[in-house]
Amino acid sequence: MPIMPDKKQLNSTPDEAEAAFYEAISKADIDALMALWADDEEIVCIHPGAPRLIGHTAIRASYEAIFERGTVSIQATQLHSVQQLMSSIHSVVEHVSRQNDDLPDIHIIATNVFVKTPHGWRIAMHHASVAAGKAPLDLFKASVLH
């Protein structure tokens, strides 16, 4: 059984946990990334076009394979969230820059689910899907009158 990283880092809000998640990905820092996941073995990660991964071992292996190719430049935008006392669900648009390829940048629609633990807010689920066409407009913000 793999040894899980010590979860010393406290994220006092789901937004802090999410920012740390994308920062760890951008730095290809597997230990920082895995420290953000909840201790529960029922955690779930679904990468675009890939099968569902359950548990720390499977999720870690998937990110190690991704990081073998280097860092990943992702910018999460258009956050829409629903927060309860002990959980928070975030829907974001991830803009992925492909700096090393001749391929165009892509955007991904992702759902991140956070749970409040004694160690701060942690990721319980990340589900991402490549979206066809141009990045969606943030219709919620466009409809707000000031």
Image (spheres, rainbow, N blue to C red):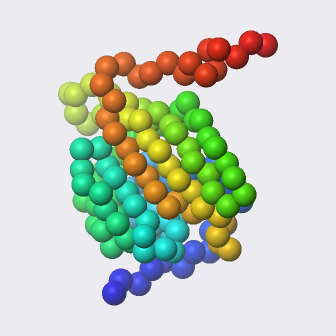
Residue at the spot x=53%, y=53% of the render?
Answer: 113
Image mark count: 0
Residue at the spot x=38%, y=71% of the render?
Answer: 56
The x and y percentages for residue 16 are: 64, 52
Residue at the spot x=30%, y=25% of the render?
Answer: 132
Which one is in front, 8 or 45?
A: 45
Judged left or right of residue 2, residue 15 is right
Which one is in front, 144 or 102?
A: 144
Q: Evaluate whether residue 8 shows in this view.
A: yes
Q: Quadrant of residue 10?
A: bottom right
Residue at the spot x=60%, y=61% of the render?
Answer: 115
Is 143 rendered above or below residue 103? above
Q: Quadrant of the N terminus?
A: bottom left
Q: Evaluate whether residue 16 shows in this view.
A: no
Is 131 rendered above or below residue 21? above
Residue furthest right in the image:
146
Judged left or right of residue 41, residue 49 is left
Is 71 rendered above or below residue 59? above
Which one is in front, 116 or 66?
A: 116
Judged left or right of residue 105, residue 75 is right
The x and y percentages for residue 141 are: 64, 20
The x and y percentages for residue 120 are: 66, 66
Q: Quadrant of residue 65?
A: bottom left
The x and y percentages for residue 58 are: 30, 68
